[in-house]
Image (cartoon, grey):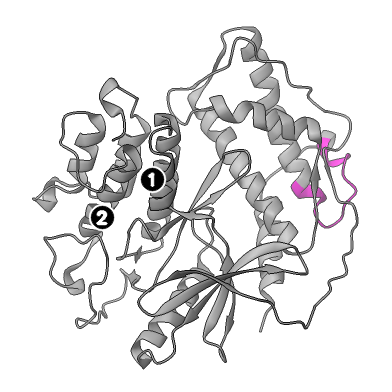
Amino acid sequence: MANPTDLMLDDLKAKYAAQPSSDSFTRLYEDQEFGHMFSVLHKHLNQHFDAINDRAKTTHHYWADNSRDLIALIDELEQDLHNLKLAGNEVKLDPRYQEAIERCRPWLSRSGGSTVPDDFELIDVVKFEPVFSRPATTVKLKKTTMAIKLKMVGEGSYATVHSFVDPDYGIKFAVKRAKRGISERDLQRFKQEFEVMKRLSFPYIIEVYHYDEDRHEYRMEFCDETLRTYISKRNSKLSFSSRKRIALQFLYGINYLHSQNLLHRDISLQNVLLKVYASGAVLVKLSDFGLVKDQSSTFTRTQTEMRGTIRDPLVDSFKDYGVVNEMYSIGWVLSYIFTGRESLPAADNDVGRVVQKCAANNVEHRYQTVLGLISDVEHLDATPTDAPA
């Protein structure tokens, strides 16, 4: 059986191998294993930083497409460096570039372009030295045999979730463990959840790493909060632009699932998780795929209990469940993100109209694809009536 870490590294290298660099950046990196990846990222960062410096001296407006590209690049950069760290490959980003990213992050917008602050200090663009480095090209893992204490952080109908800090990496992971005494059917559903998540690869889907057949548990990346707790603790202070970024990450994750012919069927405020960084940035992670359904499959258990906490009142059985039914629970989650209320708002502003179109009583009037919904959310702007509860 292939090592999961090796598979992850192979996928990472293949992704960057498909992207061109240039001699001016390739020459800066002698790292045979990840040199091309570093040169590609360095090239893209320099292109954005040069353009931002030009905009800071002229119009103070950074174009919409470029803004979205830079936001995606930053997310991808952070995720890929994190994955390398999990695999034992520590990568350091030049402090000048880390600082530049943190200065750009607050004003970057996914729609309508971004306004470069009047007092924005020009970025020191590095062209003739590497900005990525590895302190060492080898690493020795402890591979400790000591028992690691688990802390329970969540519980569902047929599994519990615990957290622990891996002594090799010093990184917190989560363990999802099937409850003792659950039915064979639920245990099969639990295993299927892992298998589905294992074959998915997307920034807004939680990653899983290893299934233990003896313990009936699997390891996955740790997330700090559920969507419900994150919004409820910050509802009075969370800006519209922050809510919009969270909403779009959530929708990008759902759209990816649908592009893989999968329906989640259990979308709720508890099953949308967030990684919260010290800088204040957040990364949405979809989780809990125990009721996931392959749309291309003609087989559906008609006896499957509809456990989702947000359920479309127009569907009685999972046999009849489709994208338009998933759209109902998507609308509820969007409503909570933008308003902090666990209810559907009236269609008296743009957010309300988008949410109501997700949950329309006539399914033909609902969004038929998540892509159409994403387009409308990307065009949302803050109005006086968009204040949270």
Q: Toward which corner of the image does residue 300 lie, by quadrant?
A: bottom left
Front-most of residues 36 and 386: 386
Q: Is residue 312 left or right of residue 116?
A: left
Q: Position of residue 253 (x, y in %)?
A: 43, 53
Give me the disc on residue 172: none
Instruction: Give the quarter of the image for residue 55.
Output: top right
Image point 87% across, 52% down: which residue?
31
Q: Secondary structure at mark 1?
A: helix
For the record, the magenta segment spans: 25-37
Which quadrant is the C terminus positioned in?
top left
Q: Is residue 312 above or below residue 151?
A: above
Of label 2 and label 1, which has the lower sequence position? 1
Which residue is at the front of the view, 176 or 212? 176
Mark 2 or mark 1, whichever is nearer to me: 1
Magenta stretch contains residue 33: yes
Q: Amino acid at mark 2?
A: Ser
Q: Secondary structure at mark 2?
A: helix
| Main secondary structure along the magenta-highlighted residues | loop
The residue depicted at 70 percent of the width and 65 percent of the height is 10
- Residue 47 place in picture, x, y as percent: 69, 28
**Residue bearing mark 2:** 329
- Binning the other alpha carbons within 10 Å of mark 1 as few (below 14), some (14 to 19) or many (20 upward) gives some
Q: From this view, report whether residue 224 is shown above or below residue 70.
A: below
Q: Residue 302's x, y, as percent?
A: 19, 81
According to the picture, the residue beneath numbered tag 1 turns out to be 232
Q: Are marks 2 and 1 in contact (CB under 8 Å)?
A: no
Which residue type carries mark 1? Ser
Quadrant of res 103: top right
Counting from the top left corner in percent of width and height, residue 145 is at 78, 83
